[in-house]
Amino acid sequence: MPEKKYCIFCKLVEGKIPYYKVYEDKDFLAFLDIRPLNPGHTLVIPKKHYKWVWDVPNIDKYFKVTQKIANAIKEIMKTELIVSIIFGEAVQHAHVWLVPKFKGDGHPFGWLDMKNVKDISKKEMKEIAEKISKELKNKKKDKKLFLKHFNHRNNY
Ligand SMILES: [Zn+2]
């Protein structure tokens, strides 16, 4: 696939470009947008190169993962609203945008101002990514504990 060769997200998956990792599993990767419209602005992509989101075969899993990440961002960034957008033209490797919205963040009601890019230090970006990542890991642990408890109860 010649287009893959020049794809910035494929390079990122291959570890050729540094990024602020939020989540990773066998098939999907999430990281902070380096031009964040707000702190916590995250992109979720399939690791394999698909041009459009609607090309991803396991899209059910893709959206499940995206949901988990959106809820973790909600928790960490303390906001009710995560604007979720599927574009695709700028980088033609399937990706979903998750942008937390806040009161007084400079974005208009009901939309995002694409020029309103926030200046966030590398240190802060790293901290945000780590916090969301940690939140996702904790959620996983809670689920396991619950199952353990549940199975235990079933023994009686
Ligand atoms: Zn790609």
Image (spheres, rainbow, N blue to C red):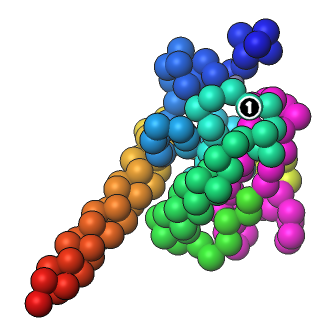
Q: Which residues are magenta?
A: 85-112
Residue at the image point whose x is 65% and y is 62% from the top: 100
Ligand 1 has an atom within 8 Å of the beta carbon of the residue at disc 1: yes
| Res. 67 image quadrant | bottom right
Q: Quadrant of the N terminus?
A: top right
- Most extreme residue toward the left is 156
- In the image, is 138 to the left or to the right of 84? left
- In the image, is 79 to the left or to the right of 50? left
| Res. 112 image quadrant | bottom right
- Most extreme residue toward the bottom is 156
Residue at the image point whose x is 78% and y is 61% from the top: 106
Crowd band around label 1 with a 10 angstrom C-alpha radius: few (<14), some (14–19), many (20+): some
Q: Is residue 85 visible?
A: yes
Report which residue position mark 1 lands on.
50
Residue 119 screen position, x and y as percent = 64, 42
- In the image, is 155 to the left or to the right of 131? left
114 relative to 89, above or below: below
Q: Amino acid at mark 1?
A: Tyr
15 relative to 147, above or below: above
Q: Is residue 121 visible?
A: no
* Residue 130 covered by magenta stretch: no
